[in-house]
Image (cartoon, rainbow, N blue to C red):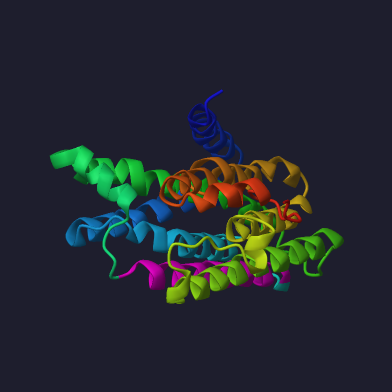
Amino acid sequence: MNYRYILLIVLIVVPAIFLFMYPLPFGEAFLMILSVLAGLWLLSLAIKDASIIDIFWGPGFVILAWFYFWHSPGPGSQRSVLLCSMVTIWGLRLAWHIGRRNLGKGEDFRYKGWREAGGKNYWWISFLRVFLLQGILMWIISSPLMMAMSDSMVFSLTTLDKVGIALWVIGFGFEAVGDRQLKQFKANPENAGKVMDQGLWRFTRHPNYFGDALLWWGYFMFALDQTGGWIFIFSPVLMTFLLMQVSGVALLEKTLSESKPAYRAYIGRTSAFFPWFPGK
């Protein structure tokens, strides 16, 4: 089955189920994030740059996490504060990294292509295809955070919570260190036209994407500790699927394979996503 149909099914079925099961605060969270993204969309029309949605991806989850915290029953526990802090550290670092990389360089080629194809109708196409879609994805993927904070009487960390923290630490390390190593590699003029295959990039072609996925498996561990929390496994699965097949590995590698012939050799000896020892 084409991945687009899988994604469409998820975007229709999952919200319907959880709106029925958790009308509050899940439904309110959607209205809140939709309002924020509508304002961001209006700003993108004013500056003619839809790329700002990429910078907002991390902070969007930060807003949702604290929204669930303040709407959890009773006083928020230290466990919930820890989870929100983990999301905040990840989200703000990602926004800082993407913002520093993108600002001042014009609109991303993907959005630029859609703008040219949409013509005069791009103003509303951009809302549906870019801002609304990403808002729905944020809303769905963030649902384990809601579940994790649904029981405000759980104060101490459980074994699953500790596993989640360990996954988060490893994932954050892969993402942050991988981004930093790539930034330093590109900053060296001697590396122009070369393929980054050093550091973490020696063991996986996308350490930052692998780390991002691992983070969400860590958040899921917090939800798994709650009764019925296992059903939220679709969240890390969806995030991993998006990173591997849609907006991450698949999209980037198509561009790199066409622009850098040496990248094909890199593909032949290095794992695409999960870290492993390089081949010959």
Q: Report x, y in % for residue 247.
A: 48, 46
| One can see residue 100 in this view | yes
Main secondary structure found in the magenta portion: helix
Q: Report x, y in % for residue 91.
A: 53, 67
**Is 157 placed above or below 128 here?**
below
Residue pictured at 64% horizontal, 51% vertical: 144
Residue 279 belongs to magenta span: no
Q: Residue placed farthest to the right in the image?
A: 159
Residue 90 belongs to magenta span: yes
Q: Nearer the viewer, residue 25 or 172?
A: 172
* Residue 155 figure quarter: bottom right
Q: Nearer the viewer, residue 237 or 225?
A: 237
Q: Residue placed farthest to the left in the image?
A: 120
**Is 75 placed above or below 254 here?**
below
Residue pictured at 81% horizontal, 61% vertical: 163
Q: Nearer the viewer, residue 234 or 20?
A: 234
Q: What stretch is highlighted in magenta?
A: 79-103
Q: Report x, y in % for residue 210.
A: 64, 55
| One can see residue 76 in this view | no
* Residue 10 figure quarter: top right
Q: Report x, y in % for residue 22.
A: 59, 44
Residue pictured at 27% horizontal, 44% vertical: 113
Quarter that holds the N terminus:
top right
Total tally of numbered discs in the picture = 0
Q: Residue placed farthest to the top in the image?
A: 1
Residue pictured at 46% horizontal, 43% vertical: 254
